[in-house]
């Protein structure tokens, strides 16, 4: 397949609208763009370009949100999670080089689907994770970010139990995604991926849709109750887990 990105006007329109919807979700939840955007992008953009494109745009979206509302982030949780995320990313990179991680994809998918269904059922007891839970969630999130480019929903499970303010959770989650994608963007840049000017032009063309999406997402979040917000998070986590299982069997 030719790796050059060449789209007609209709292709640009479809991708722009897709990214707008994806970043509305990102503006609400702080993650989820790949879940919404990747299936549509794969119809128009070479698969090898999708992860670098979304990494670049997620990083920019996260930095915009953090620059606006970074004071709302819970820095205690970030101090716990970020070092573990980095360690997990290194472990994930090592696994990727030395093993076949697909069975991990299935195991994580089954766990995530089970957890989200349990949370949505209303049977969840009124308790929260302890700070010690940052160890498995932070490291596993880092591992799966390195392996599959998707770890945001792991952090969301942890943060939704720890933080009671939805804005604090959203910005804390966004900050984690920003730091995670920054690492990937640096690696892609060192590998020469962004020397493809068609990829950079596409990101620039789609940037207004990204900015509109995160702005609309923030406004929607302001009108939601915490229960509505958590229900949406659990639906996104359920969809993410389902996609992991589908990806394993496809």
Image (cartoon, rainbow, N blue to C red):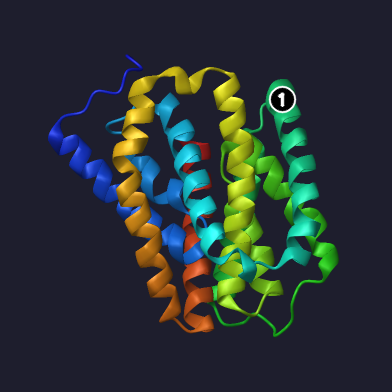
The x and y percentages for residue 208 are 31, 49
- Residue at 35% across, 41% down: 39
- Residue at 44% across, 78% down: 222
- In this view, which residue lies farthest toward the top? 2
- In this view, which residue lies farthest toward the right? 132
Circle 1: element type: loop
The x and y percentages for residue 27 are 44, 62
The x and y percentages for residue 93 are 71, 30
- Residue at 24% across, 23% down: 6
Query: What residue would you read off at disc 1?
Result: 99
Report if residue 109 is visible in the image. no
Report if residue 49 is visible in the image. yes
210, above or below 57, in the image: below
Q: Nearer the viewer, residue 2 or 187?
A: 187
The x and y percentages for residue 106 are 60, 44
- Residue at 35% across, 66% down: 216
């Amino acid at each position: 397949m030719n790796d050059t990105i060449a789209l007609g006007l209709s292709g640009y329109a479809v991708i722009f609208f897709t990214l707008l919807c994806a970043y509305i979700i990102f503006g609400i939840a702080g993650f989820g763009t790949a879940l919404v955007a990747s299936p549509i992008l794969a119809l128009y953009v070479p698969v090898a370009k999708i992860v670098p494109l979304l990494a670049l745009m997620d990083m920019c979206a996260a930095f915009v949100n953090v620059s606006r509302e970074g004071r709302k982030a819970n820095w205690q949780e970030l101090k716990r999670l970020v070092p573990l995320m980095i360690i997990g990313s290194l472990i994930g990179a090592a696994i990727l080089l030395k093993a076949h991680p697909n069975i991990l994809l299935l195991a994580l998918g089954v766990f995530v689907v089970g957890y989200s269904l349990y949370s949505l059922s209303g049977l969840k007891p009124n308790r929260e994770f302890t700070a010690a839970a940052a160890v498995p969630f932070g490291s596993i999130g880092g591992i799966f970010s390195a392996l599959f480019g998707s770890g945001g929903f792991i952090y969301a499970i942890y943060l939704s139990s720890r933080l009671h303010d939805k804005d604090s959770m959203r910005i804390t989650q966004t900050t984690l995604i920003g730091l995670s994608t920054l690492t990937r963007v640096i690696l892609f840049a060192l590998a020469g991926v962004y020397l493809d000017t068609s990829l950079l032009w596409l990101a620039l063309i789609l940037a207004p849709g990204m900015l509109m999406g995160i702005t609309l997402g923030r406004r929607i979040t302001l009108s939601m109750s915490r229960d509505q917000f958590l229900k949406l998070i659990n639906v996104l986590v359920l969809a993410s887990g389902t996609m992991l299982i589908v990806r394993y069997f496809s």
